Amino acid sequence: MAAPSNDERSLFTLVGELPDLVSSLVRAEIDQAKAELSYKAKHFGIGSGLVVVAGFVGIFLLGTLIATGILALSLVMPGWAAALIVSGVLLLIIAILVGIAYTNFKRGSEPLETIESVRKDLDAVTGRGEYGNR
């Protein structure tokens, strides 16, 4: 005798398959949460690394600003102008690195899509929300 098609399965067969389906759904949601947390950790790590680099470049900025003050007092003209230009370039580098770090921190702090997906799944199981209106 041929195996019954999906349309001919009994209620008991469908209820028997339910635990496997729920188990698969839970596993898929956990895998998605792991992937999202990995993505967020990566961007927090990149952002943290760039803040450290910006701080390191900031140390050089402090050194050039001190040199600028010394040169400004001792020579009064061209020497300090060159040091001030170097300080401006370093400040621009710091601003760019902090901007990139901010973007990565912002990406890392976005809400998890998995939480919303689990809420929709729970609504579907309990018959609430858009699923309950059909």
Image: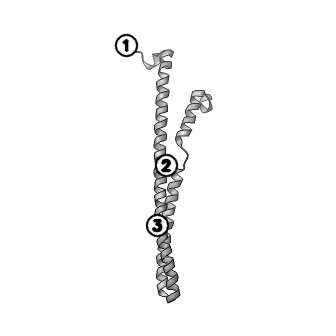
Residue 40 has which mark? 2
Q: Amino acid at mark 1?
A: Ala
Residue sitting nearer the eye, 67 or 46: 67
Q: In the image, residue 34 lies at what x, y percent?
A: 47, 41
The secondary structure type at the circle numbered 3 is helix
In this rendering, the label closer to the viewer, 2 or 1: 2
Q: Earlier in the sequence, mark 3 or mark 1?
A: 1
The residue positioned 39% from the left and 15% from the top of the image is: 3
Residue 56 has which mark? 3
The secondary structure type at the circle numbered 2 is helix
Is label 3 in contact with label 1 (beta carbons under 8 Å)?
Answer: no
The secondary structure type at the circle numbered 1 is loop
Q: Quadrant of the C terminus?
A: top right
Q: In the image, residue 17 lies at what x, y percent?
A: 47, 21
Q: In the image, residue 10 lies at what x, y percent?
A: 48, 15
In the picture, measured across the screen, residue 122 lies left or right of residue 16, that is: right
Q: CA distance from mark 3 to mark 1?
A: 73 Å
In this rendering, the label closer to the viewer, 3 or 2: 3
Residue 129 has which mark? none
Residue placed under numbered mark 1 in the picture: 2
How many neighbours does mark 2 have within 10 angstroms: few (below 14), some (14-19), or many (20 or more)?
Answer: many
Determine whether 54 is above or below 75 in the image: above
The residue positioned 51% from the left and 62% from the top of the image is: 99
Q: Earlier in the sequence, mark 2 or mark 1?
A: 1
How many neighbours does mark 3 have within 10 angstroms: few (below 14), some (14-19), or many (20 or more)?
Answer: few
Q: CA distance from mark 2 to mark 1?
A: 50 Å
How many numbered dots are placed on residues in this image? 3
Q: Amino acid at mark 2?
A: Lys
Q: Amino acid at mark 3?
A: Phe
How many neighbours does mark 1 have within 10 angstroms: few (below 14), some (14-19), or many (20 or more)?
Answer: few
